[in-house]
Image (cartoon, helix red, strand yellow):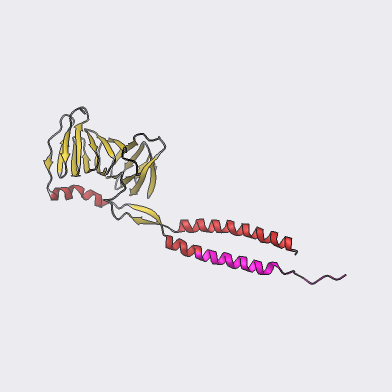
Amino acid sequence: MNITESKSSFCKLGVHIQTWLFLVLAVLLLSGCKTVPIQDRNFAESSGFWEQDENMGVRFHRNAGASDAVIGTLYASGKNVLLNGDQVKVSAPVKNNAFISSGMQSGARIEFKVSDSTCSIRIDRFNAGKAYADTSSCLHDIETLHARIQAQNAVLQINVSQQQTSIMVLSGTVEVMTREDTGQFVVVRADQKITVTPDAIGQPHALAPDEIWQRMRWREDFQLYKTVVDWRKVVAGVAIVALVAVAILFGKGRGGGHSHGFPRHR
């Protein structure tokens, strides 16, 4: 084998090694993924989050956002969480105008994507069920079967039945109005609750500490998970692959300069 053929063979081997390394690295990244529980469910980015109980559904709109823009991430608990009719097992990106439903023995959490100070999210088709929301710096305009709620920099829980909407404010202040008459509203402050029926809106009442705990127990009934990359496992795998690749190239380099067979005589 002459020098030109040796270089060509070595280059071809290099291309194959690169392809092989790319495939192995892709496999390592996939194998390094693991599912872990969401530990602190009372924290999210500056645009806030929304959690909903079983047997309910809502639709999410981000104002001034394209119809296909991703507005957040959905985390599912249970086998009956649907995003626009498709089952979600662990998590999925949420696009603008998405409808999310959580069926029997299932719950969902939506963490909204970070946005600027003009962020505004509208939530509607909320006709039954319980929800917990941290609006953070993003204005939330929530429409239930009976009420319209506007909240920003507030934490609240909403319980909707066929007869009424009950709103419990844990921090901040929210504005509550009936769905039919949005011209007048009632301000509800932290540690207060209010009830809205199809015909009237009540007055805020103070919440007792044990009442807050009792009303929020439903959040403990389901566990949420997210997928993360175990970088220690990936780095260890990459190191092994790199050693193997070096050994192959070094072995080929040593063997490439030698001819094979007996010399030919004239």
* Residue 257, quarter of picture: bottom right
Q: Nearer the viewer, residue 93 or 173?
A: 173
- Lateral position of residue 217 relative to residue 250, left or right: left
Q: Quadrant of the N terminus?
A: bottom right
Residue 228 in picture, x, y percent from top left = 39, 55
| Residue found at x 14% / y 48% | 211
* Residue 250, quarter of picture: bottom right
| Residue found at x 50% / y 65% | 239
| Residue found at x 54% / y 67% | 243
* Residue 87, visible in the rendered structure: no
| Residue found at x 51% / y 55% | 26
Q: Nearer the viewer, residue 258 or 34?
A: 258
Residue 163 in picture, x, y percent from top left = 18, 34
Q: Nearer the viewer, residue 91 or 103?
A: 91
Q: Quadrant of the C terminus?
A: bottom right
Residue 41 in picture, x, y percent from top left = 28, 51
